[in-house]
Amino acid sequence: MVYVLFRETNEKAKSMVLGLKGYSDAGLITTYSIEYLIKKFEAEKIGYFEKDFYDYSVNRPFVVVEDGIIKSLKPPTTEIFYSKRLETVFVYGFEPNLNWYGFVEDILNLVKRFEVKKLYSLGGLIDYVREPRVSGVINKENLKKVLLDLGVEPVNYEGASSIYSLVLNELSKIGVEAISLWGHVPYKNYLASTQLGTADITTAYQLLEKLNLLAKLGLNLDELLDECRRFERRVEDIIRSEQEIRFLRSDTGEGPPYIA
């Protein structure tokens, strides 16, 4: 075991939500979604992953410099949160560059430690669609109907994977159900999000809405609708001011350029 808990606890968790920056965070929707959940459910930071899983030339430490003086320097890490209100563990950080199996072993140890019954991972991918949608990957056949009943499209894909695939695969070996939800970020939203330095709120809303239904979180997401509308207006402003933005192809229903 290489994760560290700040305090010993006998608390258990019904579920775990995993959200990682990097490959799986197109439009910053993973970051936005899990930070929203951690804040909304008043999750307390209870630990972190101790082992170094990161190549600093890829995921560089974050530094704050004021008047030429280094005030703080924080290396990339993965942190563990717990919500008593929701009885849920949140794991939030960066997708590791190194030792994927060691990282997944930490996830499995946390699952066993808190007796987690179900894991949900949140991801975002760039797709050539006009409107956001959500698709899903599952690790057990019986979960397919759960996805379909909520209008989540099961993924068909072959190609490079995120670490979520490895997590789901290993969890299936110990009998823990897992669902990976993916928000499809429209290309226009991705361009706007990158230019503005903000999350694609519209797709993040869709992702949170599906998780809310799947995990029965009881969230009222109406408060995000104004944010969605503001983001959509900014997207349209950028499109109007940059006539060179074009869709490379229309939404043909084909698979995304990467996923899983």
Image (cartoon, grey):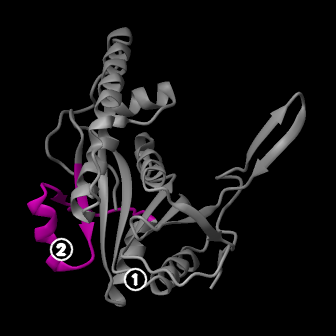
Assign the C terminus to one quadrant of the image. bottom left
Residue at the spot 28% in from the left edge and 32% down from the top edge: 225
Q: Residue 180: where, in percent of width, then height?
A: 32, 64
**Residue found at the very far bottom of the displayed protein:** 174
Residue on which disc 2 sits: 143
Give the x, y percent position of residue 117. Answer: 33, 80
The residue located at (64%, 68%) in the rendering is: 53
> Looking at this view, is 71 or 105 the one in front?
71
Q: Does residue 186 appear in the picture of this structure?
A: no
Image: 39 above or below 96: above
Crowdedness of circle 1 by 10 Å Cα count: few (<14), some, many (20+)? Answer: some
Q: Residue furthest front?
A: 85
In the image, residue 211 lies at what x, y percent? 28, 57
- Would you say residue 144 sits in the magenta stretch? yes
> Is 239 rendered above or below residue 153?
above
Which residues are the magenta region?
134-162
Q: Quadrant of residue 138?
A: bottom left
Q: Is residue 164 visible?
A: yes
Q: Compare residues 94 and 245 and report the one nearer the observer.
A: 94
Q: Is residue 254 left or right of residue 124?
A: left
Disc 2 residue crowd, few under 14, some 14–19, many 20+, Cα 10 Å: some
Q: How many labels sit on residues?
A: 2
Residue occupying the point 36% across, 76% down: 14
User: Distance of mark 2 from mark 1, alpha carbons?
Assistant: 16 Å
Badge 1 amino acid: Glu
- Dot 2 or dot 1: first in sequence order is 2
Q: Which residue is mark 1?
A: 170
Does residue 9 sit above or below 98 in this rendering? below
Nearer to me, 152 or 256: 152
